[in-house]
Image: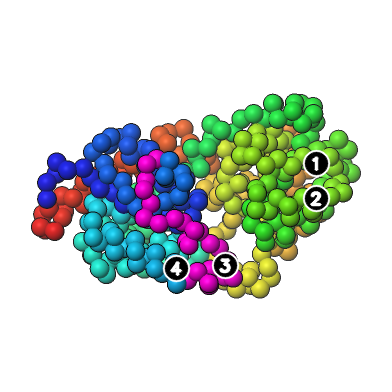
């Protein structure tokens, strides 16, 4: 095997969030390796924009929820075989499986069986440290490396026999986009000194359905304390109509924004936020927006899931800091009254806001903010690993 030929790296994602991560990684790989890298695999529109010719579209694999997944199982399993068999045929120097563990981990398992000499990398691994940690040892059977998003993940995976390197969280690359707050306030007619509360009830229908009622209750109570309070709610297309139907007769003046630019501008403009726990709380942290985190599941789902959760906090900033910097109200605690009580100081007391902003900045520094872009760090680690993989396969003659 000649080292003169380009490194071949196969990237596979299964849904739009992974597609964006994959596109950023492709761009970083090309910036470091230029024409000496050949990129193949499976991706969506973002990876296609970086030049990837996907083996198949993501339509069969980008599904969520039992009702949606079950009819697609035969197609998903066919795509698993197709991706794994393609890798076995072209024998890349590394296969990088991005997020979507229900799909990508099946590819890793099949590829380990049919071509055990091929080295396999997991980028954006499932949070097995938070729930069902035994899965980490299972992952060690079919992954050779984890590109870890969180600083405490490498020692966790190492304890389970799996090599990992911290590269930083991809959300960090959105930090520069958290701007435009002044312009958004001006466009919406919101004075600079007016208290503005951002509401983020989630991007999934079930999240929105369960969180909007306590959000409404909280805003009604806050309006009694802050008469000039205004709300802004960034939404996404697939829940937009549902949200608008339930925002009628809102207790305060309300602005609903839809574009991603306006979403980030709303974070920048807001005095504080009430947000569903998830990626959005990390985006708010990047924007330096003080917040209250909230979450509700269906009672049966929560009862089934709770015994398997092993973390003290659900908000990434709190997990990174190992303390309750961001108030968290979960399940029965997630009431309008409790949300209002937690949000009021953030809207009225500058010292409380400043304290949380300092905590959020500390958490984001731990996540990689201020250093090289996570995609660039991931690309460096991946290129080193792919070259190591090629040398290994040369040594064993495969």
Q: Is residue 302 left or right of residue 213?
A: left
Residue 213 within the magenta-colored segment of the rendering: no
Q: Please report contact status of discs 2 and 1: CB closer than 8 Å, yes or no.
A: yes
Q: CA distance from mark 3 to mark 4?
A: 12 Å
The coloring applied to the image is rainbow
Q: How far across and how far down the image is residue 238, in percent?
A: 65, 53
Q: Looking at this view, is 284 or 332 the one in front?
A: 284
The disc placed on residue 68 is: 3
Above or below for 261 versus 224:
above
Q: CA distance from mark 1 to mark 3?
A: 33 Å
**Which residue position holds label 4?**
75
Q: Residue at x 59, y 55 (%)?
A: 314
Q: Residue at x 55, y 63 (%)?
A: 64
Which region is colored magenta?
50-73
Residue under the point 42% across and 51% down? 43
Callout in the foreground (3, 4)? 4
Q: Which mark is residue 247?
A: 2
SS category of the residue bearing label 1: strand
Determine the secondary structure under disc 3: helix
């Amino acid at each position: 095997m000649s080292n003169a030929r380009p490194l071949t790296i196969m990237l596979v994602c299964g849904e739009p969030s992974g597609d964006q991560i994959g596109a950023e990684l492709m761009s970083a790989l090309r910036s470091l390796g230029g024409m000496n890298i050949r990129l193949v695999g499976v991706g969506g529109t973002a990876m296609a924009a970086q030049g990837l010719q996907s083996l198949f579209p993501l339509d069969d694999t980008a599904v969520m929820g039992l009702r949606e997944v079950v009819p697609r199982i035969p197609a998903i399993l066919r795509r698993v075989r197709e991706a794994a068999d393609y890798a076995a045929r072209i024998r890349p120097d590394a296969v990088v499986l991005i997020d979507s563990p229900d799909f990508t981990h099946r590819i890793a398992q099949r590829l380990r069986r049919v071509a055990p000499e091929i080295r396999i990398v997991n980028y954006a691994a499932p949070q097995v440290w938070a729930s069902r940690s035994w899965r980490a040892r299972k992952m060690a059977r079919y992954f050779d490396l984890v590109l870890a998003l969180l600083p405490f993940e490498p020692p966790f995976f190492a304890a389970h026999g799996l090599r990992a390197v911290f590269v930083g969280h991809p959300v960090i690359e959105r930090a520069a986009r958290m701007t435009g707050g002044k312009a958004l306030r001006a466009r919406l007619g919101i004075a600079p000194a007016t208290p503005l509360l951002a509401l983020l009830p989630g991007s999934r229908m079930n999240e929105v359905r369960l969180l909007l009622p306590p959000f409404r209750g909280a805003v009604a109570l806050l309006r009694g304390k802050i008469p000039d309070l205004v709300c802004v709610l960034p939404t996404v297309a697939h829940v937009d109509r549902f949200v608008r139907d339930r925002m009628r007769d809102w207790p305060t003046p309300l602005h609903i924004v839809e574009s991603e630019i306006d979403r980030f501008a709303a974070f920048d403009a807001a005095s504080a936020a009430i947000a569903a726990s998830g990626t959005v709380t990390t985006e708010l942290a990047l924007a330096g927006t003080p917040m209250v985190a909230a979450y509700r599941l269906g009672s049966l789902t929560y009862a089934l899931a709770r015994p398997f959760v092993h973390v003290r906090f659900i908000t990434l900033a709190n997990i990174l800091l190992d303390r309750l910097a961001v108030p968290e109200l979960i399940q029965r605690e997630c009431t309008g009254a409790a949300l209002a009580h937690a949000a009021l100081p953030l809207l009225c007391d500058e010292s409380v806001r400043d304290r949380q902003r300092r905590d959020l900045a500390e958490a984001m520094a731990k996540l990689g903010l201020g250093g090289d872009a996570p995609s660039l760090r991931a690309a460096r680690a991946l290129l080193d690993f792919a070259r190591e993989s090629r040398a290994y396969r040369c040594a064993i003659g495969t």
